[in-house]
Image (cartoon, grey):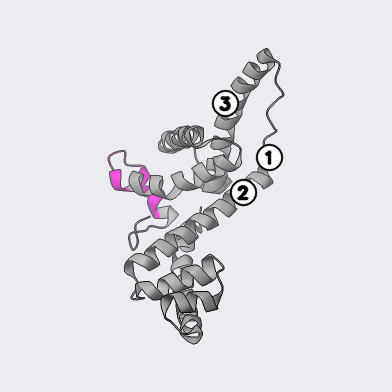
Amino acid sequence: MTPGITNTTTNLLAGLHDSGNRAAWSEFDSRYRPILIAFLRQMGLNETDAADVAQETLACFVRDYRRHKYDRAQGRLRSWLVGIARCRLADMRRVALRRRELRGESAIRRLPDDSQAEAIWDAEQRRFIFEQAIGELRQVSRFNERTIEAFDRVVLRGEAIESVSAALDLTPQEIYNAKNRIVGRLREIVARYEADFEDA
C-alpha cells in the first residue's frame, strides 16, 4: 500500500468490477499478495510455491468476484481468500502426497481448520500492517533519521537503551521522549491501515 493512497475494502472491491481499472487491481494486489504469501509460508510452502499459489488465489478471486460469486453478506473477504488459498494448497498437497506415496515417503501434514487458518491470516495481516506503518513513518514523518534509528534499535530490536544512547549520541531521556512521540504517530498510522482492512 502506498502511503496516503489507500481505499477502504468496499471502495477497492467496487473498483475491481471494472476490468480496466488497473489502479484498483494494483492496490488490491499490493494489499493482499504479501499477506497471502506470508500465510502460505506459514502453511509450509517455500517462497516460490507460496508466490505461485498466491497468484492463483488472487486471480481466482478477481475472476469469481467479477462473475458475482463473492457475496459479502455470506462472509468476510479474508475468509474467501483463505478458502481459495486453502483449496489451491490442498490441490498442491494432494499431488505431492501421491508423489511421496509412490516413493514411499511420509504424508504431508494436515491443513489447519478454519479458525486456525484465520488466526494465522490475522497474525500475518497485523505484521503486514505494522511493516507498512513503519515504512510510512520512515518515508513521510518529520522525525530525523537518528530518532527513528534509536526507536528501531530500542523498541523493535530490543537493544539496551544505554548502548543505543552512546552509539547515537542521544541521552536516554531523549530516546524515551522520541519513543513516546513515535509510538503515538505509529498508532495513528496503524489505525488508518487497519481501517482499510476493517470490512475485509
Badge 2: how crowded within 10 Å, few (<14), some, or many (20+)? many
Do the residues under discs 2 and 3 have CB atoms within 8 angstroms? no
| CA–CA distance in space, label 2 to label 3 | 19 Å
Residue range corresponding to the magenta coloring: 11-23
* Image coords of residue 165 (percent x, y): 48, 79
Do the residues under discs 2 and 1 have CB atoms within 8 angstroms? yes
Residue matched to label 3: 92
What residue sits 59% from the left and 35% below the top? 86
Where 88 sits versus 175, above or below?
A: above
What residue sits 40% from the left and 37% below the top? 66
Residue situated in front as seen by the camera: 96 or 154: 154
Residue 109 is left or right of residue 42, and the answer is right
Badge 1: how crowded within 10 Å, few (<14), some, or many (20+)? few
Residue 146 visible somewhere in the drawing: yes
Q: Main secondary structure of the magenta part?
A: helix
At label 2, the amino acid type is Ile
Mark 1, secondary structure of its residue: loop
